[in-house]
Image (cartoon, helix red, strand yellow):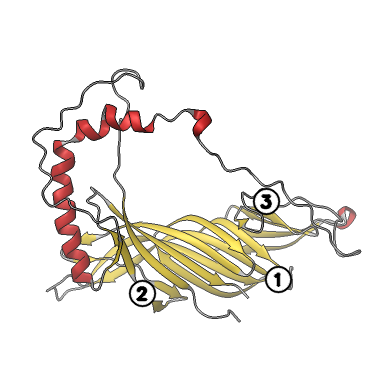
């Protein structure tokens, strides 16, 4: 039984796609940028995290901010993508603080249960696990092979064998393992039915979807699917702390004929939650939903 529901927060963040940042000249070369004549009206931003109260408010925000940003970026492309941007990005390598990898822990296992020492996935922060396509717990190896979850008895080596091969729906990406629970993240596309505003005929579209499949692996020869949660968008990142799995899904804001595809979570085929949506009121050319989910897998 899964404890509680998934906890979700949808956040609209602007993503400006900057192509060809370095064109003419060297990075260190400085040239004056002409920003005269740029219309800054409608571009005021508070830099505060705000919450949308309705779909219509989201629609109004997209129409007003995207329109203003488009005119701004078209008029100031040289100022933003030219030397000013390059100069700000040119940080000496020595000044960049890179995260240090925590050495892979060596975990002890009770006699007769598994190897005395084994390496786990390299992690950045101790106690915070990172998903991967292969995991091990000292006795078993869990790996994704094409569209299958494969569990192998690895210790003792003289008894090594494949215990199970479970077909996974969708495209498997990464896994977590904790005790007798295993989580598989998958991606696929699904058909979404919607009604445009003032429309009477339903329309369909294909949309990306990320699923978190939770398995009971107490019987390694026969993993059992306990439940699955799905969210709109592409799988991005995930972490696990104790029994909690946190993951982020990214999805371009779909806005067509006054219809906005809002984030939704499903357990199986049933809609169980529409998360609140927060945003920064910065004008951007493109907007993306970043949905952050937390699931207790026990």
Q: Which mark is residue 44?
A: none
Q: Residue tagged by mark 1?
A: 180
10 Å neighbourhood of mark 2: few (<14), some, or many (≥20)?
Answer: some
> The C terminus is located in which quarter?
bottom right
Question: What is the C-alpha distance between the residues marked 2 and 1?
Answer: 30 Å
> What element does badge 3 sit on?
loop
Quarter of the rendering containing residue 152: bottom right
Local packing at callout 3 (Cα closer than 10 Å; few below 14, some 14-19, many 20+) is: some
Q: Secondary structure at mark 2?
A: loop
For marks 2 and 1, the one nearer the N-term is: 1
First-in-chain label (3 vs 1):
3
Secondary element at tag 1: loop
Do the residues bearing badges 3 and 1 touch, measured as CB atoms within 8 Å?
no
Question: Which mark is drawn over residue 274?
Answer: 2
Query: Which circle, 3 or 1, is nearer the viewer?
Result: 3
Q: Is residue 207 above or below residue 202?
A: above
Question: What's the mark number on residue 121?
Answer: 3
């Amino acid at each position: 039984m899964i404890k509680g529901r998934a906890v979700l927060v949808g956040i609209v963040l602007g993503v400006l796609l900057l192509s060809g940042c370095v064109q003419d000249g060297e990075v260190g070369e400085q040239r004056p940028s002409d920003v005269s004549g740029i219309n800054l009206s409608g571009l005021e931003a508070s830099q505060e995290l705000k919450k949308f109260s309705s779909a219509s408010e989201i629609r109004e925000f997209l129409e007003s901010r995207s329109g203003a940003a488009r005119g701004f970026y078209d008029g100031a492309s040289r100022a933003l993508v030219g030397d000013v941007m390059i100069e700000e990005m040119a940080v000496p390598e020595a000044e960049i603080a890179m995260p240090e990898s925590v050495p892979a822990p060596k975990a002890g296992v009770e006699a007769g249960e598994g190897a005395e020492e084994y390496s786990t996935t390299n992690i950045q922060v101790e106690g915070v696990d990172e998903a991967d396509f292969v995991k091990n717990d000292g006795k078993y190896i869990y790996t994704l092979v094409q569209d299958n979850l494969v569990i192998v008895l690895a210790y003792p080596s003289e008894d090594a064998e494949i215990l199970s091969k479970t077909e996974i729906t969708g495209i498997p990406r990464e896994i977590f393992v904790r005790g007798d629970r295993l989580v598989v993240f998958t991606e696929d596309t699904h058909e979404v039915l919607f009604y445009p505003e003032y429309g009477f005929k339903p329309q369909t579209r294909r949309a990306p979807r990320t699923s978190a499949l939770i398995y009971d692996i107490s019987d390694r020869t026969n993993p059992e699917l306990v439940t699955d949660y799905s969210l709109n968008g592409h799988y991005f990142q995930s972490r696990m702390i104790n029994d909690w799995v946190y993951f982020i899904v990214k999805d371009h804001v779909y806005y067509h004929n006054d219809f906005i595809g809002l984030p939704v979570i499903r357990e199986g085929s049933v809609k169980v939650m529409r998360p609140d949506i927060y945003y920064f009121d910065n004008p951007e050319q493109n907007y993306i939903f970043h949905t952050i989910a937390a699931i207790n897998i026990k």
